[in-house]
């Protein structure tokens, strides 16, 4: 059931077995998937559905996202995603999210920065290019604009594996889907690390869009006080930088 009230969009999602990992916990990419779907619905409710955006050769591109995870969902849970626009600062837009379980407990929250782009020229467009106004929702805030990921110089990176963009990873703009980058980050960790650690968050900056056929070398750091840093690049071209954070063991 989809519900929206004024400038706040609320949408429910069920967690299916295919959305979970081998531990029966929701994949991190699943959280990004449902946030992205809720954001698409929110924008569509304003008269800017995906079809109209594509006809106008415009699209939304996330540049940085910061996600705090209180716990990962389990199969068959019913989750509620709340999302709203916080307006724009220049050419950049901020969108916040909160995810709740059936009891009303918040299991995750996120802040993100988006840009409106010309999908042919890959240039950032001014907010005035939108045919409708996107008003900010001011009744809630997850926090300030998230900072770009900066991998410390004292966190040496080692190659973890290599990945080539194929059909299954592409979105409707012909580029690697935002949530798939998160799968690349998670794949850089070993199963032993997943079993020993409890994920508490993700910060990711998308630096360059990956297209079909692009080969991405995934580098990762060792566990630092901040978390595990991950970078995807091809030569000097950096596609993304991220940090997976983990709760302190009890």
Image: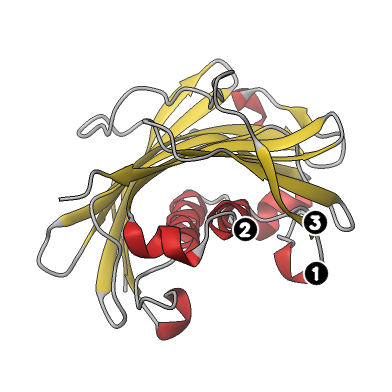
- Residue 205: image location, x then y, percent: 58, 33
Position of the N terminus by quadrant: bottom left
Farthest residue, direction left:
103
Q: Between 207 and 46, which is closer to the camera in this rendering?
A: 207
Q: Between 190 and 24, which is closer to the camera in this rendering?
A: 190
Specify the quadrant of the image occupied by residue 90. Answer: top right
Number of numbered discs overlaid on the protein picture: 3
Q: How far apart in space, not on screen, are marks 3 and 1 (Cα)?
A: 9 Å
Marks 3/2 in contact by CB < 8 Å: the verdict is no
Q: In this view, does 96 lie above or below 21?
A: above
Name the side, left or right, on which 137 lies relative to 51.
left
- Residue 11: image location, x then y, percent: 33, 63
Q: In this view, does 48 lie above or below 187?
A: above
- Residue 144: image location, x then y, percent: 34, 22
Mark 1 or mark 2: whose residue is earlier in sequence: 1
- Residue 88: image location, x then y, percent: 48, 23
Mark 3 or mark 2: whose residue is earlier in sequence: 3
Q: Name the residue under label 2.
A: 180
Q: Is residue 94 above or below residue 29?
A: above
Residue at 57 percent across and 51 percent down: it is 185
Residue at 43 percent across and 33 percent down: it is 224
Element class at badge 3: loop
Residue 131 visible within the image: no
Nearer to us: label 3 or label 1: 1
Residue 15 visible within the image: yes
Neighbour class for label 2 at 10 Å: few (<14), some, many (≥20)?
A: many
Neighbour class for label 1 at 10 Å: few (<14), some, many (≥20)?
A: few
Residue at 9 percent across and 67 percent down: it is 103
Q: How far apart in space, not on screen, are marks 1 and 2 (Cα)?
A: 12 Å
Q: Mark 1 points at which residue?
A: 167
């Amino acid at each position: 059931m989809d519900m929206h009230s004024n400038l706040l969009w609320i949408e429910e999602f069920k967690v299916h077995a295919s959305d979970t990992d081998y531990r029966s916990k929701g994949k991190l990419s699943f959280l990004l998937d449902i946030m992205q779907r809720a954001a698409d619905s929110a924008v569509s409710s304003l008269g800017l559905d995906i079809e109209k955006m594509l006809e106008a050769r415009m699209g939304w591109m996330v540049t940085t996202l910061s996600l705090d995870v209180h716990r990962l969902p389990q199969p068959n849970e019913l989750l509620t995603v709340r999302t709203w626009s916080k307006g724009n600062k220049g050419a950049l837009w901020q969108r916040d999210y909160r995810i709740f379980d059936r009891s009303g407990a918040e299991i995750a929250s996120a802040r993100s920065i988006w840009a409106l782009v010309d999908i042919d020229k890959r240039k950032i467009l001014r907010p005035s290019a939108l045919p409708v106004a996107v008003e900010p929702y001011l009744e809630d805030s997850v926090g300030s604009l998230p900072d770009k990921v900066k991998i410390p110089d004292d966190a040496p990176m080692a190659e973890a594996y290599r990945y080539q963009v194929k059909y299954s990873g592409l979105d409707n703009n012909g580029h690697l889907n935002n949530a798939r980058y998160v799968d690349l980050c998670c794949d850089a960790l070993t199963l032993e690390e997943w079993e020993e650690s409890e994920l508490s968050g993700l910060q990711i900056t998308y630096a360059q869009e990956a297209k079909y056929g692009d080969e991405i070398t995934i580098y990762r750091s060792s566990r630092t006080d901040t978390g595990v840093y991950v970078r995807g690049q091809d030569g000097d071209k950096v596609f993304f930088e991220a940090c997976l954070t983990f709760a302190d063991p009890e």
